[in-house]
Amino acid sequence: MWVSRAPTYNYPHFLLNFLYMSSLKFVALSGTTGVTENCYIYEYGDDMIVVDCGVGFPDADMYGVDLVIPDFSYLRKNAHKLRAIVVTHGHEDHIGAIPFLLKEIKVPVYGSPLTAGFIKDKLMDYGIRDAKVHSFNLDTDVLNLGVFKITPFRVSHSIPDAAGFCIDTPEGKVFHVPDYKFDWTPVSGKPFDVTKAALLASSGVLAMASDALGSTSPGYTESEQTVEDIIKKIVRDSKGLVYFTTISSNISRMQQAIFAAEEAGRKVCFIGRSIIKKVEIARKLGYIKYPQHVVISGRDAKRIPRDKMLYIISGSYGQPGSALYRVAMGEHDLLSVEEEDTVVFSADPAPPGAKFNVDFVVDRLLEENVDVHYYDMQENLHVSGHGSMEDIKMLIGLVQPKFLIPIGGTIRHMRAYGKIAEMMGKKKNEVLELTGGETVEFSQGRVSRGETIPVRQVLVDGLEVGDVGQVVLRDRQILASDGIAIVVMGFDTAQKKVVGDPEIISRGFVFEKMRKNFLTESGSKLVKHLDKKRIVNTAVLKREAVDFLERYFFEKTGRRPMILPVVAEE
């Protein structure tokens, strides 16, 4: 059995000698400068564990890129050492990259029941059916993975079943506490287990890696309970149909929406594949509860009066093609909006590019005279799952580690976290700021900077991983901003000269009204230019055509379209 209730270490003398020669290495593979893409490595001798393995989201200029994942080069190199992936909670920026790692390295994965359920479902989406995904009990279980003994404890976050870890190592205890806050009235009814955390820390803690994202926000982060009262009031006052949207993993927020619907005498229907799947997983495991008669199918919902329905619908980030986007655009097969309807956004548009998309959907709904409740209205429809300044102080005071490692934020968050730590009595050299690939090593109670592991952005584009380079992205940027022009030319290989008039076809380059005359004129100018040149082969012809048209197009239009020359040899 992989779980041990009360394990102890009794190393033989030869192993103790080996252990004293080693040091504990902490690697911030990613997740310290970009908020998402959380992935951290603990390594000691021939043992290694990964804590969290999440995705990042593409920047607005990463055209066509779907996801950003950690660089697994170091893990591939040390695959023989890797004992497990241990996961703190079920958000995408902590679990989303697991399928990509498991395709390369077969290793067991551990998470709390809800987290493990989400991971299994994700692996099925990627066609991975042979992975070993284990769930642990947050209150009782301990994991033994090589030299590491990991004791999970419950933390409060915006998703149920979130964990922090106390990791026993030969160098001492390390606490790993990513996304958390001190919420004493969570929807799940199970707050941060401060008693267990304090007991685990009572024998002394070498270091703690903890969430820095809220380090610039004063006070304590508000409880999820404050959101529920606002949701209930909006639903109670709504005269028509209600659409409620949040991220698909926010099980607690969906539970609150169900409470509000039930109180207002409304039925509930889930819309959107991601929401339906996650709710089903959470319901089977007991993390979301509702009477059978309250939640109905889409077919049954069509027979219910509009003022007696609440749809929990996907699309909180305004994703084109999502269910809510299609409703807003009038393109959904089954659903629509009318003047007296209400749409509630209960999510912060945090990922890059999300706010632009959400703003578009909100504006589209407002054009239809729908009552829209969203982030800019200051209604507190969303509270952060990340601890603010006072939460951070409380955690540092509770654990009292010798060294601190800020994670999960950006450079400014790490710097603000350091100032909080100094207020708590820490010296500057006791707060260890790490960027992607940087490491620290602990040996006999002391810390030193270790090697910097080369890491790069690994981009996922459709079915391809890592093959989207800067050249491809630059080409896509040109296509998006300046369009494309294809020039088709005939070439007499015997006489080594262009024959006939070139045909230029464009898309996204010049206005429709001026396209034909302008492109015809451009072709004539190109022929005159080529007649003056010595064209010895098709390669020279292509180069001369591209060089001339690049200059000519920019001179005439101020734009630089991508130019693709096509030569038909005769």
Image (tube, rainbow, N blue to C red):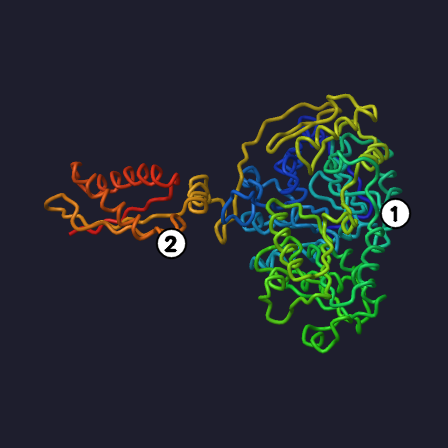
Mark 2 residue element = helix
Q: Is residue 534 visible?
A: yes
Q: Residue 126 appears at what percent x and percent y?
A: 56, 57
Callout 2 amino acid: Glu
User: Of 232 and 54, which appears nearest the observer?
Assistant: 232
Q: Which residue is mark 2?
A: 512
User: Of 416 and 157, which appears nearest the observer?
Assistant: 416
Q: Is residue 565 left or right of residue 243?
A: left
Q: Residue 84 appears at what percent x and percent y?
A: 66, 46
Please determine whether, in this image, residue 36 is positioned above or below residue 369.
above
Query: Where, by quadrant of the figure, is residue 218 drawn?
Result: top right
Mark 1 residue element = loop
User: Of 90 and 306, which appears nearest the observer?
Assistant: 306
Q: Which residue is mark 1?
A: 184
Q: Is residue 404 left or right of residue 450?
A: right
The structure residue drawn at horizontal position 68% and vertical position 36%, both measured from the top left corner, is: 409
Tell me if mark 1 has few (under 14), some (14-19) or many (20+) residues whose alpha carbon lies within 10 angstroms of its own.
some
Please determine whether, in this image, residue 305 is positioned above or below residue 315.
below
Callout 1 amino acid: Trp
Tell me if mark 2 has few (under 14), some (14-19) or many (20+) residues whose alpha carbon lies within 10 angstroms of its own.
few
Q: Residue 297 appears at what percent x and percent y?
A: 70, 73
